[in-house]
Amino acid sequence: MRRRKALVAQRIEHARPKRVMGVQFSPGALFMELQLAANQPGFTQKEVRIIPWRGWLKLFYSLAAFSLILAGAIYIPKEILKKRQITKSENLILTANYQNRLWENYGSVFEPLISLSVYYPQTGYQNEQFLLDSGAIISSLPREKAAQLGYSLARLPRTTFIGFGGATSFAYQASVNIMLGNQQAKIPIVFTEAAGTKSILGRLGFFDNYSVYFNSRAKVIEISQ
Amino acid sequence: MNFITFFESISFKKLFGLTIALALCLAIPISVWVAQKPTNITKKAYFEKPTPPVKQFGRPSAGEPQITLVWPFLGKTGDAVLITGINFGNNPQAKTLYLDNLPVTENEIVRWTPDLIEFKIPASAPSIVFETISLSVTGRNAYWRYPFTVYDQTTKIQAVESGRILKIINPPAGGELEIFFSDGTKIDSTHLTGVTIPEGKTVISLVIRDNGELPISFFVEPDEFGF
């Protein structure tokens, strides 16, 4: 401390003359005046120090490191949780393994097929294979299923749909009860013109109510609430 | 300023240790809190606010409109019906469509292209047999003079076709059946229990009349007539 005071005094000694309240003081005289004033009762001597840039640098470094660690503490668990949620959803209600099909021109390509239990009034729940098709507005069943499901096409609302090639066909609107995992659900469907075609799960009532995740790593289709 | 002097006086080594210690003290409870909190994953895909479709009106065709088929030949209110033909125009503004005297409103016209019109049977349509479907495009008319039947959920009379035999279920006593074919010919029959459809002929319309020769509503199963 003494050494520092001596240094400060030395700096003041060698400094240029200063003008304080209109009076010209030589640095030495100013120092003497200050020392005299300091000896007076009620005067507290305060050390005047020049703050070096190192203090600010340390503060900045400290704050940066602190923020970085805190940000990591929030971000890392979030990322881990996100990955865990994607791979293992708590709301998962159904999984189906990828089913590969060998195509002449394209080789083995998986078919997005899932098997659901559909309620038939005569026989109860029966498994039906559906093709997941997010491009389809509404789910559809071949029209020969209508009678088995207890519907008369003549009594159902008739609409049209435009298929591949722009051909207009008639479709009949109804709804079916299905089992999705352990949950019962009623989804709107249409009975389409083309008999013998695949049953399709489309957007209305299915994709807009359930999350469908194609887990390519696990080769499964996951359907969650 | 004391704060800065503190930082100035402390060594880098101590500062590093203090920062780590303090940050870890806060980071551990924060990590635990974040991990226990239910994570909401939100992904913002491009979303365009849906706008109600606006019907675009186009130009009428140059030639005279002609109807070649109205299919199917019956339906309930709200059911879709297709009119095929030529020179209907590309949804011209000056157009009308009538089931006898019952207008089909703009809202009930689903599509109007030069060779195809799709409309819904008006909600106000009674369960009767309409004799003519007519349309007009900029003052030029086209007609379909085959019976078009509107039925409802209470209709009991059914026309059934199986193996080219057409019969009527719950037929009216003393009634008769008229079958119209695509080649312009027709068959009249009072044998409602079974009428043979000649090979190579395609049914385009049917009408069942009661003993007073008034046409009455009936329904068919679409599969049997190919719609």
Image (cartoon, coloured by chain):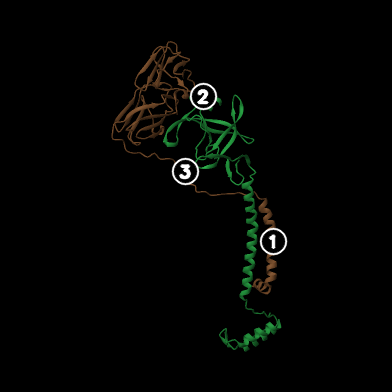
Chain colours: A green, B brown
Asked if residue B222 lies left or right of residue A65, the reply is left
Report, in whole angstroms, how far the alpha carbon at label 3 lies from the one at label 2: 35 Å
- Chain at tag 3: B
Position of the N terminus of chain B by quadrant: bottom right
Residue A209 in view here: no
Residue assigned mark 1: B24
Specify the amino acid type for callout 1: Leu
Asked if residue B159 lies left or right of residue A183, the reply is left
Q: Position of residue B109 (x, y in %)?
A: 40, 33
Specify the amino acid type for callout 3: Pro
- Name the residue: 68% across, 50% down: B36
Q: Position of residue B99 (x, y in %)?
A: 37, 25
Asked if residue B209 lies left or right of residue A82, the reply is left
Residue A152: mark: 2
Position of the C terminus of chain B by quadrant: top left
Structural crowding at the residue carrying mark 3, measured as other residues with C-alpha within 10 Å and reported as few (<14), some (14–19) or many (≥20): few
Report, in whole angstroms, how far the alpha carbon at label 2 lies from the one at label 1: 70 Å
- Chain at tag 1: B
Residue assigned mark 3: B50
Structural crowding at the residue carrying mark 1, measured as other residues with C-alpha within 10 Å and reported as few (<14), some (14–19) or many (≥20): some
